[in-house]
Image (cartoon, rainbow, N blue to C red):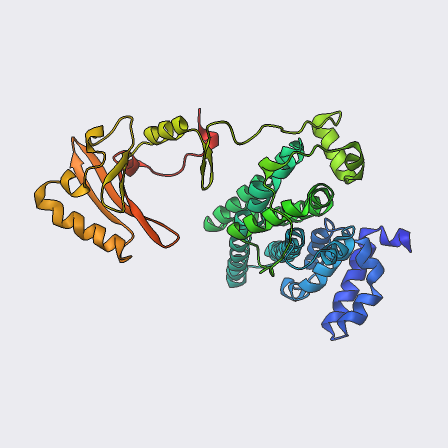
Amino acid sequence: MSELLNNREMKKEKLKEMLKKLHSGEDEEKVKEEFKDVLRSISPLEIPLIEQDLVAEGISPREIARMCDIHVEIFRESVSGAEKEIASYPEGHPLRNLYEENVNIVKDSEVLNLYSSSLRRTDGNAMKNTMKVIEGLVRGLKAVGYTHYNVEEMVVFPYLERRGLNAVPAVLWRKHDEIRAEMNKVLELIAREEYGKVEEMGQDLAARLIDMVFRENNILYPTLKVLLSDGEFKAIRRLSDEIGYYKIEPKEWISNAKEIMPYEVREEITAEKLMSLPQHLIQELKKNMGEVNLKADEKELIRNGDMALEEGYMLPEELSAMLATIPADITFIDSEDRVRFFSGGERIFTRTRAILGRPVQLCHPPKSVHIVNKILRAFKNGERNKAEFWIDMGGRKILIQYFPVWKDGKYLGTIEFTTDITDMQKIKGEKRLLDWS
């Protein structure tokens, strides 16, 4: 039996038989039990290939797509311990959330593969309708990059990097970006109606998404389980909430542990913990680093003289120099309408320290004071959150914006933000980071 199950053709025939029984109305649980050995023998990377064969043999992609929940079960039973891992965490735990998001990613990737595979057998209106479905699927999957991948890159990876595990996050991030780029390419091909290329690239995109799920479930998440503490997971959950999730709404997860941010981690990976990491990870490390020799990042975040800001720490001279470097004039007026600060550096409008402490009304010509007061009154009353004007000066277009500053329901003052937008008005197309030279 095991030899037969290792044969993809036999797996395909068994899966086809299973789908037919489901289609005929047989009980789903009974069918799953009958074919459980087949389900367990199919790796997640084989599923798109088998589905592609089924579509080529005439089984409707729409019909197969109706079985998506079964496909998810195939995935969850075939990936080593994935379903047990999901159940092993309380609802709302950040690792459980990541696993559950991957279930949705696999389901949507399978549907994308099915419809992409069916393009060769459609034409006319059917072709156009299928392309609309594919476009909708890809646009929906783009949210994976904004949520699931973004959480890993901006929240999870710093915890590994702090421990010296830089190679695996770098590999995964690069693959994330390849997937993001391929999503955009598929949408461009659809817009240009290059349907032949959409078929191939849509299938490839689905395979890449499923491959990433396999890597995360078998490398990344087991590694997090071994290395991270409850305090770190508590921080990950809070920060993940700020970014968002892919097609799940996690329940609240309560931990009594103190939140630990990446820069607070002082722990090195011991030999014992290294031995407990998944073999997939060790292989990945050896491939990228040769001999595995992890050096933790021991740099302290807070330095002598740092000011504790709401979202970080800076020396006063760093903050002052940063504000002077921003290509805009910044002036802050406090809640009593007095000038408290202005940025240095090259300015559009001249400011000197003589204006510090001066009522802002006296900084404007008498004819415009009533408008200044009107703006400030609207800000303080919460009626408006912006006032902006633009003028021509010396052949340049100058944008002047005012924003009220609030904290915990209290009005603190107003920012004046003045920018030369002449060159901005000429911007067209894109220039990305990798285009810089």
Q: Residue at x 79, y 32 (%)?
A: 271
Residue 294 position within the rendered picture, expressed as x and y whole percent measured from the top left: 71, 28
Camera-side residue of 148 and 37: 148
* Image quarter of residue 292: top right
Vertical position of residue 203 compared to residue 58: above or below: above
Name the residue at 59% across, 47% down: 235
State whether residue 181 appears in this view. Answer: yes
Residue 396: x and y in percent read 20, 33
- Does 83 appear above or below 151? below
Image location of residue 423, percent across then percent down: 28, 33
Q: Position of residue 145 (x, y in %)?
A: 55, 47
Q: Is residue 174 visible?
A: no
Residue 344: quarter of image: top left
Q: Is residue 134 left or right of residue 32?
A: left
Residue at the spot x=77%, y=61% of the render?
Answer: 15
Say which quadrant the N terminus sits in.
bottom right
The answer to which of 346 and 16 lies nearer the viewer is 346
Viewer-side residue, 144 vs 235: 235
